[in-house]
């Protein structure tokens, strides 16, 4: 069993590659999490987890990460990914992920609505939202990726 993460950051990046996997891998590298092993998690930020935008995670680590991404091989297509972390005053947080064929602004608006709804259905007070987003116009094979990596 893994310990409960104590720190997190929000990140988003895009990249081109010669294959879907290498486009994804390059986006991870640009997002500062390309040399770790992602453990995909759903949408709850642990209570007391602190935001650390300069967080460095050791290579090869197993990293709980909530993320969304999109890959396309359609030149000229605009793709985006975004994540949002909704923060409550004295409770856990809620993470939402989104990716789609749109611009970053639309992705951010979608994330904001999703976080607000998640807090409303939990009947929790929303104190703040941290968002990371990226948009990418595909040249050959492109990936847009957004994530909330959590660490100990």
Image: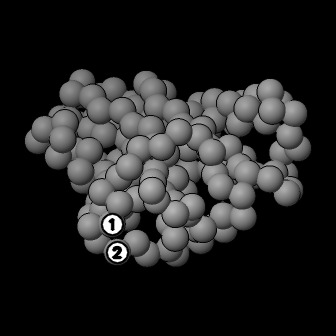
Residue 92 against residue 122 in the figure, above or below: below
Q: Closer to the camera, 111 or 88?
A: 88
In the visual, does 151 lie left or right of 58? right
Which residue is painted at 26% across and 44% down in the image?
Answer: 24
Give the class, few, some or many, for how many residues have Cα within 10 Å of label 1's Cα (few <14, many ≥20): some
Q: Which residue is mark 2?
A: 58
- Asked whether residue 83 appears in the rendered view, the answer is yes
Which residue is painted at 35% across and 60% down in the image?
Answer: 62
Which residue is painted at 68% across and 43% down in the image?
Answer: 94
Q: Secondary structure at mark 2?
A: loop
Which residue is painted at 58% across and 68% down in the image?
Answer: 7
Q: Which residue is mark 1?
A: 61
Q: Position of residue 59 (x, y in %)?
A: 28, 71
Q: Position of residue 55 (x, y in %)?
A: 50, 73
Q: Position of residue 87 (x, y in %)?
A: 76, 52
Label 1 near label 2: C-beta < 8 Å?
yes
Residue 80 against residue 31 in the figure, above or below: above
Q: Closer to the camera, 83 or 142?
A: 83
Q: Disc number at residue 139?
A: none
Q: Secondary structure at mark 1?
A: loop
């Amino acid at each position: 069993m893994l310990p409960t993460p104590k720190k997190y950051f929000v990140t988003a990046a895009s990249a081109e590659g010669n294959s879907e996997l290498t486009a994804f891998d390059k986006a991870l590298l640009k997002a500062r999490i390309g040399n770790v092993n992602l453990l995909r998690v759903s949408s709850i930020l642990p209570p007391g987890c602190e935001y650390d935008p300069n967080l460095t995670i050791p290579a090869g680590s197993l990293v709980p990460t909530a993320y969304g991404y999109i890959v396309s091989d359609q030149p000229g297509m605009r793709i985006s990914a975004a994540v949002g972390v909704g923060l409550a005053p004295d409770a856990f947080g809620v993470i939402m992920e989104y990716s789609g064929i749109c611009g970053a602004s639309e992705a951010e608006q979608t994330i904001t609505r999703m976080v607000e709804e998640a807090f409303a259905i939990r009947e929790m007070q929303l104190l703040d939202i941290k968002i990371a987003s990226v948009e990418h116009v595909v040249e050959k094979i492109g990936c847009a990726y957004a994530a909330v990596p959590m660490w100990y």
